[in-house]
């Protein structure tokens, strides 16, 4: 049996002013061809299928197109929700997907989260413990009067218990099937020791920053999502992030993107191979003074209709303020197969003399950046900063959860209105 592990597609992402439709289309076609070539039995997408809770229509269309194409290969699809995915968005097509050999797990669900995968001989080949992004309200009841440390410990215990309970059920299921097939678990979270990139939105589940890798049950493989850099966690090599298939920020442009291909026999995983994903959109970061950047432009070919432009992130260094820097860069790149996506000046300590010249925009800062800088300008005591930062992150998580809840209620309301209209035509309106 062969299983492919991928994650963090972020369909519908806008990269500054650019959408990623063509890249995702190319990745989709490449992945379908890989599945056909390897005769893969299953595909696991470990969260963040979409980039936002309300993805644009073309992103949903691409998702549906992929599922339809995949169904023709006989490959079993397992989709897990990530922190970017709205539960309501994924669940709206869950029943339809089930008819297309696909399991969609948007939140913990004991009726759906234990999946037996069958090989081409219609024999059990693996058991998947399908764990999506876990929100505190899904696994934990809050208690009044708890300290931050007590809340963190309670949440860590709840996540660990959820994984252990699901693993125990998988072991029981394996006994019931009278087989010794591998057990595979999934997850969408940050683990201790994972290397992140700029495009990763930090997950603070309540007040828990990262989950210890040693707290996972002894599954044969743990397929993780959320971190965009492909990597293995710990020494076993069986806890892995597949990473995103396309670079989602300029600091990922130098990374080799990949998916993991697992080869299984009747009772173990015999190989875990990283399959490189082609680069569908070249991206380059340039940093230096204007002369250095001008020389770097010599590496780019002339612009023509057959050459794909390279997306550029340019950081101009130097102490002199150049008011016409944008026009200068534009003039240098106009004849080249290159397009400036991000142009900024080097970040350094801002003084009274150059504060206007080097002022950053909110588009360049994360909410954590803004909060940290506001604290630095205040009279906050040093020992209070960690506590206030934790509280701020908790509030941000609550706001995101509330936004998703509102989106779900709107979706339910629309569905209800549609049902009422249908019934009224029959003279049976409720």
Image (spheres, rainbow, N blue to C red):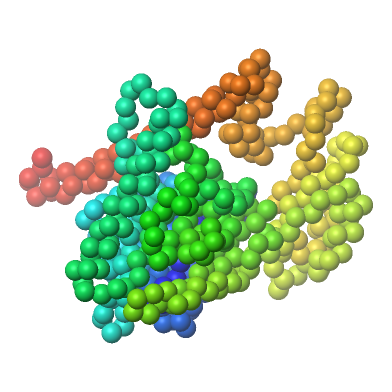
313 sits left or right of 354 in the view: left
Q: Residue at x 16, y 49 (%)?
A: 422
The C terminus: image quadrant: top left
Question: Where's residue 92, x and y in %?
Answer: 30, 53
Q: Does the rendering let one see residue 11?
A: no
Q: Is residue 370 above or below residue 338?
A: above
* Residue at the extreme top of the image, as rendered: 379
Q: Is residue 273 above or below residue 163?
A: below
Q: Does the rendering let one see residue 247?
A: yes
The N terminus: image quadrant: bottom left
Q: Residue at x 85, y 44 (%)?
A: 317
133 sits left or right of 177 in the view: right
Question: Where's residue 54, x and y in %?
Answer: 42, 47
Quarter location, residue 19: bottom right
Q: Residue at x 44, y 47 (%)?
A: 83
* Residue at the extreme left of the image, as rendered: 428
Question: Where's residue 147, x and y in %?
Answer: 42, 24
Question: Where's residue 81, x and y in %?
Answer: 39, 53
Q: Residue at x 40, y 31 (%)?
A: 151
Q: Is residue 248 above or below residue 357?
A: below
Q: How many marks?
A: 0
Q: Nearer the viewer, residue 388 or 423?
A: 388
8 sits left or right of 313 in the view: left
């Amino acid at each position: 049996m062969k299983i492919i592990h991928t994650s963090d597609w972020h369909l519908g992402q806008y990269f500054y002013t650019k959408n990623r439709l063509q890249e995702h289309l190319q990745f989709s076609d490449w992945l379908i061809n890989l599945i056909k070539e390897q005769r893969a039995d299953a595909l696991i997408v470990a969260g963040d299928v979409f980039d936002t809770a309300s993805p644009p229509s073309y992103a949903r269309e691409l998702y549906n197109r992929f599922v339809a194409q995949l169904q023709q290969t006989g490959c079993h699809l397992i989709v897990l929700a990530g922190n970017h995915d709205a539960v309501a968005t994924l669940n709206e097509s869950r029943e339809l997907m089930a008819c297309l050999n696909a399991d969609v797990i948007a939140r913990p669900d004991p009726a759906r989260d234990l999946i037996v995968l069958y090989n081409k001989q219609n024999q059990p080949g693996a058991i998947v413990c399908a764990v999506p992004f876990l929100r505190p309200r899904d696994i934990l009841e809050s208690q009044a009067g708890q300290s931050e440390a007590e809340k963190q410990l309670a949440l860590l215990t709840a996540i660990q218990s959820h994984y252990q309970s699901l693993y125990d059920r998988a072991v029981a299921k394996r006994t019931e099937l009278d087989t010794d097939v591998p057990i595979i678990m999934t997850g969408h979270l940050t683990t201790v020791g994972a290397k992140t990139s700029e495009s990763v939105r930090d997950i603070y589940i309540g007040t828990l920053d990262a989950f210890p890798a040693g707290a996972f049950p002894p599954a044969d493989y743990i397929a993780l999502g959320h971190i965009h850099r492909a990597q293995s966690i710990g020494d076993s090599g069986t806890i892995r992030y597949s990473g995103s298939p396309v670079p989602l920020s300029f600091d990922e442009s130098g990374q080799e993107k990949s998916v993991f291909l697992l080869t299984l026999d009747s009772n173990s995983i015999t190989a875990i191979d990283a399959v490189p994903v082609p680069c569908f959109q070249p991206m380059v970061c340039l940093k230096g003074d204007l002369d250095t950047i001008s020389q770097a432009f010599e590496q780019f070919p002339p612009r023509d209709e057959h050459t794909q432009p390279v997306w550029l992130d340019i950081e101009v260094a130097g102490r002199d303020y150049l008011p016409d820097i944008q026009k200068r860069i534009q003039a240098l790149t106009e004849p080249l197969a290159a397009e400036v996506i991000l142009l900024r000046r080097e970040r350094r300590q801002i003084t009274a003399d150059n504060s206007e010249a080097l002022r950053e925009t909110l588009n360049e800062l994360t909410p954590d950046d803004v909060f940290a800088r506001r604290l630095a300008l205040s009279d906050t005591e040093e020992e209070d900063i960690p506590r206030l930062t934790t509280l701020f992150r908790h509030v941000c998580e609550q706001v995101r959860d509330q936004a998703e809840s509102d989106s779900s209620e709107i979706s339910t309301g629309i569905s209800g209105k549609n049902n009422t209209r249908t019934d009224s035509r029959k003279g049976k309106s409720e």
